[in-house]
Structures are given as structure tokens and as C-alpha cells.
Image: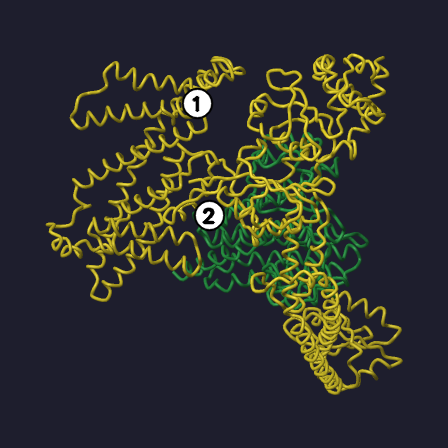
Amino acid sequence: MLDNFSGNAIMTKAKAMYGSHLTVSQYRELMNKRSVSEIAAYLRSETQYGDVLKEVNPGSIHRGQLENLLRESRFLQYRELMRYNTAAKTDYYHYFIAEIEIEQILRMIRLLNMGTPEQYVLQYPRFVERYISFRMDRMAKAKSFDDMLNVLEGTLYPRQLAGLRPKPGELIDYTRCETALYNYYYAEIEATVRRCFHGGTRNQLNEMFQVHVELINIRNIYRLKKYFPGAAPDMFQKSFVSAWRRVPSSDMERLTDAGDEAAFFAALNQSRYAKYFEPKDFEFIESRVKNIRYQSAKRHLHFTGAAPVAFTAYMTLCEIELGNIVSIIEGVRYNVAPAEIQKILILPND
Amino acid sequence: MIEEMSLVRLYGETKTLDQVLLNCMGSGQFHPEHPAQLAGNVGGFALLSEENPYKPMLATAREIVGAAGLKAADFLEQGDGEETDGEETEQEKSLKKEALDLLLDFANKTENYTQLIEKLQSFSSEFEKLFACKYLKIRFGRLPAESFAKLDQFSGEKFHFFSLTSDQHYHWGFFVTTEEAVAEVEDIFAALSFHMEGKEGGFTLLSEENPYRLILANMREVAEMAELELELTAHEALDKSAAEELDKFILTFREELMTLANRRKQLEDLAAKSRESLTILDRLNTLDANFDELFDWEYVKIRFGRLPVDSFAKLDYYADKLFLFFSLSNDKRYHWGFFVTTPEAMAEVEDIFAALYFERVWIPDTIRGKPEAARHTVENDLSQMKNEIADLDQKISALVQENKAFFLRAYVTLDQLNRSFEMRKYVGVYRESFLLTGFIPKREEANFASLFMGVHNLTLTFQPHDSDKRLQTPTKLRNNWFCKPFEMFVDMYGTPGYNELDPTAFLAVTYTLLFGVMFGDLGQGAAIAGLGLLLWRMKRMPFGKILMRIGACSSLFGLLYGSVFGLEDVLDPLYRALGFASKPVHIMEPVTINNLLMVAVGAGAVLIIISMILNIITGVRNGDLERAVFSNNGLAGLVFYGGILAGIVSMLAGGPNLFTAPYIAGFIVLPVLVIFFKESLGRLVEKTGGFLPENDGVGSFAVEGFFELFEVVLSFVTNTLSFLRVGGFVVSHAGMMGVVLTLSEMSRSTGSVLVLIVGNVFVIALEGFIVGIQILRLEFYELFSHCFEGQGKPYSPIGSNSQ
């Protein structure tokens, strides 16, 4: 009973919060700003981000700081929704925290590969400090892969990464780490969904994550085909997220076996994803993938009656909105024409 | 009805223009016409003796003559050489020659003029004489055949028109008039669509820069600074002598005001900075040190600022770096404080802090000494500034008070001048003369003329409204007190054309009656009328007047239905006293409902017939036979509709079946055929074409005609049945009130009254609204569509406060 009430509250709250998301005309206004300060000032006075930006001085704000604050805002929204989560099904909602943890680990791996791990201290989001399973201030002091694994001790991540320790003098294999972590992440979510939910809720969550995972795989295959034309088959295997695979593996094989871009499109046209893509979409495959996610999330948020689905959909929409704003900030920062910026945005009427 | 209009033309000297324009505005009756409609082929006031506008063309003409191997003299020789004025002077000779050159030029320019020239060759002596005459002026051109026929009407005027040649549409020739009358005559011919050939220039439109606009803009700026409200009605305009000083006065006033205001702004800015300093001091007040000394340190450098809370927590990471950060105060997001480091390490430390999003705060010069002392100084400064600002405010207000009265009057004066200047767009000028054309109601002619009595050299003429074909006469509706408010609804549909019938009276009567019938209730009607009275009295809303009329009518019908706020028996004693057994109409009885619906449709049919008759009258008045006789809303439609109605009524009333073969042939088939061929018949009667359309094939004509006919027949049925709603709403009103009463009876004493009141308010608001809209719909769709086009031009006089 209580479960249902808390669920309803989360669902209603998520739907209500979505009402204050940016509108197309607000996006237009943002795209037409001339500096990061103007964007910050606009976000502060005209949007729901006003709360986190209240104290800042738009005139002197730094781009990174602004992005951090926007991320914090997204996290605060997560906390806001979690206030209503009085039920025992916290396991599922934890996936959002796991996502942040994996992002942080991957960020550290990137910095280690670049030889600038000391940058981590500037980048880690302190507002999640209390919620994640390892200490980021300790992570900031890591200087090597092993230091990092030490910091992660006591969590489930070292097990995923243990086999991927680089040989002395070599870089860490970022792609494999990424695949390993996300494989683990999606497998965990899949298991949690199976354990905690059934019926319509489970189906809807499956649908959302399946689409997402499959799109990631297709995107990865396409990137490999395009940028590494002679990539060996095991490269593909390396970059596959194996959870929730619904596309028959024969289909996937056809995609991976495709000799070049054209053959890839031909294979894609045979698959169940034909309806999602047109050749021109691959110019901006990232945004196309996001767009499909966006449509799916919006549809689920509108029509679902289940709290976990509404939650997932809402957090996805938040993430997409955040991505949009970050794209706009970068575009404006580098004087990109609004029309060009708009091409990579996922806008409500798209 | 539609007010009869007159066309007014004012000719005068430009120096009197301002006065004339102000008088026109003052009259409140003058509807100006834009001269752009008149320019073009209005030749203008140019007199040949004054300046020959053809001169530039002459050179070309001579060249052409030369090239064609003709000699101007050839033409002269063809005449018989008879002369009236004795010896020709040299000047006259050259004038003749020029005139001939001119004709030759025309001949070469326009093909039509070859005919003219041919004719002229046998006529040359006559026009030579005309040209030779100093006091006569001549204009060549072509006149539409239709206008030529009208020339007789102007027999008293001082001109003669000679038609030299003509075709189906035009007479080619010239008119002759005296030097004094040439302007007036030119205008008459212009109005008759005389196309003056080769004429260049003529009237130009006044397009000077409005000199008052800038001064007015200045004044508005000053008014904003001085916080003066610019009202036009409350103040009198200045007299003329004072008006000349205006510009200077405003500049001086503005300058004085600006000096004070600028100083005030300066102080405001300083005060804002001081307040900022105070905020900073608030943040740093835990610092027990002297700011001046801090900045004077040689081996330790210091930076004040704020650091995000998140970054503050990350400072531990830099424990090995050479700096110290002191937090003096903090809130949810920032730590306010300073860091110190050595000059050598400054660059590195500044980088670290920049990466941590440290925002440096510059300590303003106003902050000196210890925070506490600095605060004291700043607060002192601030209070001094406040005093000075208050002082300035007083000075400003004194200055404003001193100049206010004159300033506001100056504004009114300038506004008038400005608007009269804006009116100049309606003025055509040529050299020192101007021409202003417009319309006024015919009955205002005398009053209007009297306004211009004293104006020097002004010619004011009144002409019939249609004497200038280029202008569309504006429509001014004139209705009695009862119908006037309903003009609003007519305008909503469209302004009636000047030659149309004004449907306002028809609408006013039918609207009021229908509302009364559909919403009959003594109490609610009175409430609506009362609401209307309030709206009119308090808000001056014209709609209030309509509410008063329909509310009253609703009350009258309420008496008939015996209904007061939905209570059906309250009036019974009254009826008994009057000798009736009970109320006259019992709406909810089945028999009444049946009859009600029949009567509604019947009344609708009658209204439709009336609207068709109105259409026929309009058609006849405009000589539009197609509209009056052949169209579906003309006689043919009326016969068809009337024929079918008569047949049905006869059948329903138990009379003979009228639908016999001859009846059907005469009253149904024949009018349908006439409607089908209405355009063809119209063309035949007006002799503007053949029976079949010129551009379309027979097939498309037949198909189009058939569908049109189908629609016509269908719309007769739907329009009639549409009136069923009248009966429907009578019943629905009674029904809704029945529900309210039932609910009221179910409640207890106080509640019952409350339900009754709320119910009544609800019904008045909802049903009153719906009924009002439904009737308007009936009027527009079912009635206006039969008789009214609404393509007129609204009459909008330039008044003191409009345009």
C-alpha cells in the first residue's frame, strides 16, 4: 500500500517537474546568446535552474562551473524525487548513483591515460560525495591504475576492472574498461528489474533500456566501421554491451560483418532498427541516438502509470536537457551559428 | 439609414493651409481622401504662360519632326490662315508653333493620336485660333465615353470640350477654358477621368519632415524625467504668439532639468557602489586588520574574493602548496575570504584558485582602514549622498512646478500642430496652392462652409458624392436612439456600401425581439437591463446599451410567459386581476412546444423573405438587375422560396394541394432556371457580353452552375430550419430554470434562496450569452447573407482627437 503511494508520488512529481523543463523558445533564446555570461544570466532568471544559480555572478562565471552547477541541479532533482521513495525498492533507483560512479571511474581512467590525474580534484562533483560508494577526495590523489583500484576497494568495481590492468608502460584500455563497467551496470539493472518488478512495469523498463543498449551498440559498430574500417571482429565484441540484447545475434553479426559504411547501411535496413535511421542521420549519430531515447522517454513519461518508469524517463529527459544546454554553452563559447547548434540539439518538437 | 454625403474640395494658398487643416479637424465632420488616389492624372495648376511643363518634351518633338521629314509649318499652311486678332505677334507665332510641335510629339508617342492628328489636319485653323488666344487655356486628352455624356450637366461651367475623334470607349480631344478657371476645370475633368496626355508633374504630395515630431519627442522625454502626466484634454492650447517661443522654452527647460537629473544619476551610481562596498564589508567584517596595510605588504600578497563551497572542501588537496585561505564568512554556496601567498608563488596559486572558480572581489577605494572604520566612512558618505539626492529632488520638483502649467499647454498646442501636420498627407500641392478633397455629411455643408469664411483666397466647393469616380464615398450610418447601439453588430459584419440599404434598423428590431422571445423572463430581463445600464454608465461600453434594450424586451416577454426569475406562478394574481384565467403562454406544455417550433420556423421564413425584399430594393436602387431580379436573393429566389412555402403552408393548413404542374413550372422550375442562368441573363440585359461566358467552356459553366444551384436550394432549407433554435431556446430556458427550481426546493430555507440566486446568475450568464450569440449568428448567416454585402468604406472624420 505504502509502496503504491510513494510510487504515485514519485510519478506525479516527475511529471510535474517535467513541466518546468526548457521550451523550444527558451532553447532558441539560449542559442542566440553571445556569451556564457548571458547564458548563465538567462538560465538564472528564466528557468528552473535559477535555484542553483541564484548566488552566482553571471558576469564572472566560468563555463566549467556553470556545467557543474547544472549537473548539481540534475542531482538535486534526483534527490527531490527520492524524498518520496519510502518503499523498499530503493535498489532500482540506485542505478542513477551507479551511473555517476562509473562516470567518475571512467573520468579518472581518461585523466590517467592523459597523464594529468591531478586534474581530477578540480573536476569531481562534490555534491554526490555523500551518496557514492567510494571517496572521491581519495580518488583525487590516485596516480595509477592500482591506486584507483585501491580507492575502489570494498565496491564491486575492482572485480570488473581487475583483468584490465595495463602492462607497465602501456595505456589503460579505455574501451574495454568502459565496456566492462557498462556491461556490469546494465546487467545489474536488468537483474534488479527482474527481481523487483513484474508485468507492465517490467516490460516498460525493459523496453526503455533495451532500446538504449541496442542503440549504443549500433552506434559503436557504426563508429568502428567508419573510423577503423579494418577493425578485427574482436574489436566489436570488445565494445558490445551484452545485457538486454534483443536484436538477434545473426542481425548483429550482419552489422559487424559489413565491409564498409554502405554495407553497414544495407544490413541496418534489414534489421528492426531500419525505421529509426536514415543515412543522413549518421552525420550526427549521437544526436539521432539521443533523439530516439528522447522520444521513447517522453512517451513513457506521458503514458506510464508506474513510478520506476516515470522516474527513468524523467531522469533521461533531464540528462538530454543537460546535454543540450552543454552543447549550447560550447557552441556559444566557440561562436557557432545558432542554426548549427540547433542541428545537434534534441528539441521538444523534434 | 445611410447619411447622405457631399464631396468637398478646398483650393487655397499654402500659407493658409495650417488654418484650413485645423478648421477641418475642428469641424469633426471632414473625412479626408488621400491625394494619391487623385494624383497621377490630375493635371495640376500649371498655366502655360507661367511655365510650360511640356518644354522638356519639345526638344524631342522637334527632333522627331525633323527625322520624319515633316515641318511644323506644313500644318500651319494647311489652315486657311484666317486670323481674328489682326497681326500675329512673334510671341503668338511661337506659341502656335509650340502647340503644333506638341501635337506632333503626341502623335509620335501614342498610336491613338495618329487618328487625332488626321482629324486635326482638317481642323487646324480652329485650334490655331485657340492657341493664339492669350486668355484661353487648352488641354488635350481623352475622356471616357460615359463621362462625355455627362458633360451636359456642367453646361454652366466655364469650359468647352471639343471631341476630335472617338471610339467605343473614349473621346479624344481637348477642353478650353479661361486662365482663371483652369485649375477648377482641370479638377472637374480629372473627376470625369479625363486622361491628360503628356502631362508631367502636377499635384505632388506633401512629404515634408514633420518639424513638431522632434520637439514632441523632446517634450515626452522631459515629461518622463519630470514625472509629468501628459494629458491632452485638461489643458488649453497656447495662443499663437506664445506658440512661437515654444521651441526655445522647451530647450531651456530640458537643459535645466537635464543638469539636475544628470547630477542625481551620478549620485545614484555612487550610492550604488557604496552599498556594494557595504555588502562586501558585511562579508569581511570578521577581519581584524587594516585594509590599507594589507595591500601594502611587500612579501605577502593578498587576494579577496569568494570560493564555491565545493571548491573550499577541495583545498586540502593542495596542502603542499604555498598559500593560506582564510574564510571570513560563508553561506550555502560560497566562502568569502582571502588567500595569502608570496609574490613568487602568486602566479601558480592564482591558477589553482582560478581552476577552483575563485571569484576575486576588488576592494573599492571607498574602503579604508579596518572593516569597522571603513563601514563607518562608507555609511557616512552614503547618508551625505542621500541628502544631496533629496535636495536635488526638491530642486527638480520646484523647477517642474514652475514650468508645469506652461509646459502642459505647450504640449497640447504642439500636439495640435503635430496632428494638423500629420494631416498634410491628405493635401496635394502645386506651387503655392493646395487641394484638399474629402467628404462631409450633406446636411453639414452650411456649418462646414461657415468655418472657412475668413480664409483668404480659399475656394470651397460642394459636389454630389459620386461626382468623382475615383473616390469611394464613405458610409456614415445614421440611426435613431433605439437602433444606434446595434450599429456595432453591423460594423462587426462589414460597413454597408454607400448605395446599400443600412440593415441596422432591421437588425435592431429582429435582434431585440428574438432575444425577448428566446430569453423571456421578467426578473432576468430586468437584471440584464440593469447590468447594461451599469456597463454604460460606469464603463461607457456601447454594448451596455444593447443589453438595456434586449433586457427590457426579455422582461416584456417574461410578462407573457409569466416567469420571474424562473418562478412561474408569481404573476398569477396579476393575470387574474387583469381578467385572465392564468398566464397567456404555458411554455412547457407539449402543445405549446409544438406550436412554438412551428411559429419559430414561420417567423424565420418571414424574416428571410424580408431580407430578400431588402436585397431586391438595393439591387433596383443600384440598377443591378442581376442582383435584383435574377439572383437567388432577387426576385427569382423570392418567387421560388415563396412558391414552395405557399404550397407547404397550404398543405399543412388543410387547403388545396398547390403543387400542380403549371404551379410547379411557374413558381419552381422557372425561377430555378433563371437563377441558373443569372449571370448570362445579367450580361444580356446589361449588354456587357453574350449568353455564354467568354472564358469558360459550356461544360464548366454547366457544372459550376449546377453545384451553385444545389447549394442555393440547400441553403434555403437550412436557413429556414435554422430558426428552429429560436423555439428550442425558449424551451431550454424554461427547462434550465425548472432544474434550478427543483434544486432550490430540495434545499432548506436559506440554502434554497441561495440556490435560486446562484442558479439565476448561472442561467443569465450562460444562457444569456449563448442566446445572444445564437441570434447574432442567425442575423449574420441566415439574414445578412441574403441582403447585405458590407463592402463599404467607413466614414472616419478627422477630429480633434482621432487620426
Residue B562: give x, y in percent of width and height.
19, 51
Identify the element where label 1 is drawn.
helix
**Residue at 21% across, 53% down:** B563
Q: Colour of chain A?
A: green
Residue B238: give x, y in percent of width and height.
64, 63
- Of residues B196 and A174, the one nearer the viewer is B196
Q: Quadrant of the N terminus of chain B?
A: top left
Amino acid type assigned to the residue bearing label 1 in the image: Glu
Q: CA distance from mark 1 to mark 2?
A: 61 Å
| Chain letter of the residue carrying label 2 | A
* Number of the label disc, if any, that sits on residue B626: 1
Mark 1 and mark 2, same subunit?
no
Q: Colour of chain B?
A: yellow
Residue B436: give x, y in percent of width and height.
63, 42
Identify the element where label 2 is drawn.
helix
Name which quarter of the figure residue A69 lies in.
bottom right
Classify 10 Å Cα crowding around label 2: few (below 14), some (14-19), many (20 and above): few
The count of marks equals 2
Residue identifier under label 2 = A303
